[in-house]
Amino acid sequence: MGILAQFQLDDQVAIVTGAGSGIGRAIAGALAEAGAKVACVDNQAARADEAAHALAAAGHTSLAIQADITSEHDMRQMVAITESQLGPLAVCFANAGVAERRSNLVDAPLEEWQHVLDVDLTGPFLTVREAARVMIPRQRGKIVVTASAVGFVASFHHGLSRAYGSAKGGVINLIRSVAVELAPHNIQVNGFAPGYTRTQIGGGRYLAETPETAAFVEAVQERCPAGRLAEPEDYTGVAVFLASQASNFMVGHTVVVDGGWLIV
Ligand SMILES: NC(=O)c1ccc[n+]([C@@H]2O[C@H](COP(=O)([O-])OP(=O)(O)OC[C@H]3O[C@@H](n4cnc5c(N)ncnc54)[C@H](O)[C@@H]3O)[C@@H](O)[C@H]2O)c1
């Protein structure tokens, strides 16, 4: 197969969770541009609709699904609806996630810890499990999970990524563990770990729209070797690579794409 052909996703069916915003939205666009038919999944229906409409307006086949990744029922339905409307699932991106509010450990509410673990760790587990259930009988598939650089290290701002970093560290090992289980079925499971990225996550703390968040963003930029935050489009290349035949011998790894954050 020619090198560029390895990256093509012609008519393959893909699911992207959290496709209504930020990184997921950029990934959905990239997969569609590479030829995939994309189910845009989000728990906010309007966001899922908008993402799917944008793909359709650009001439791609797409579908909007409102689903909560923490719900077994929703994750089962997500796969069933995708397969009945678009065809057999080939690619699944477990991307949706939430951040936590900053707090001191001694004041940290259990509800928030539980919510972040539910969305950021149990959510990917349920997403991956439902994808595997339809992929295993076909002996083919690509599963990609969005981790985070703070799944490898602590946040440089204390109290910002306690539950989040714990969940993302768990996700990096979830990727390894399910990758071992699914590799004999010709299903490759991998992840990527973004650095700080300009999206809506965390109530807009990376958008620098207030003096407080602007100061935070400036501190991030100073600390980051690349000297900037990422844009969601910074991950589209790695997303297509991990979804395509070009990554067929890659099993259970999390690719770090962080502007050099983890090397200093
Ligand atoms: N932005 C960053 O700096 C950054 C860094 C590292 C990793 N990430 C990860 O990237 C992924 C995407 O985040 P983003 O920055 O694009 O954030 P975002 O808030 O812009 O987008 C996340 C989307 O997920 C959806 N979502 C939230 N909870 C959901 C649920 N329970 N079920 C279904 N959908 C749900 C939201 O409605 C939203 O549309 C997340 O896993 C996040 O942890 C982000």
Image (spheres, grey):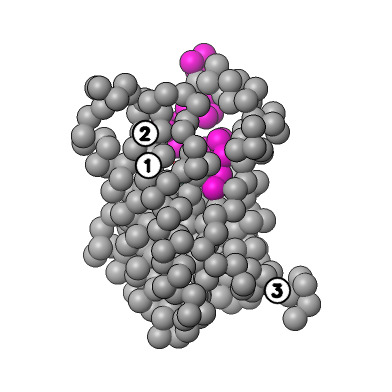
Quadrant that contains the C terminus: top right
**Residues at badges 2 and 1 in contact (C-beta under 8 Å)?**
yes
Q: Per the image, is 198 magenta?
A: yes
Q: Looking at the image, which residue sits at the far right?
A: 2
Quadrant of the rendered image containing residue 242:
bottom right
Query: Bounds of the magenta span?
Result: 193-212
For the point 75% across and 81% down, the residue is 1
**Residues at badges 3 and 1 in contact (C-beta under 8 Å)?**
no
Residue identifier under label 2 = 162
User: 229 or 9, which is in the foreground?
Assistant: 229
Residue identifier under label 3 = 6
Judge whether 253 appears above or below 159 on screen.
below
Q: Position of residue 263 (x, y in %)?
A: 64, 37
Determine whether the residue tagged by mark 3 lies in a helix, strand or loop.
Answer: helix
Q: Is mark 2 within 8 Å of ligand 1?
A: no
Q: Position of residue 258 (x, y in %)?
A: 62, 41
For the point 49% across and 52% down, the residue is 146
Q: Per the image, is 175 magenta?
A: no
Amino acid carrying label 1: it is: Ser
Residue identifier under label 1 = 166
Judge whether 99 appears above or below 176 on screen.
above
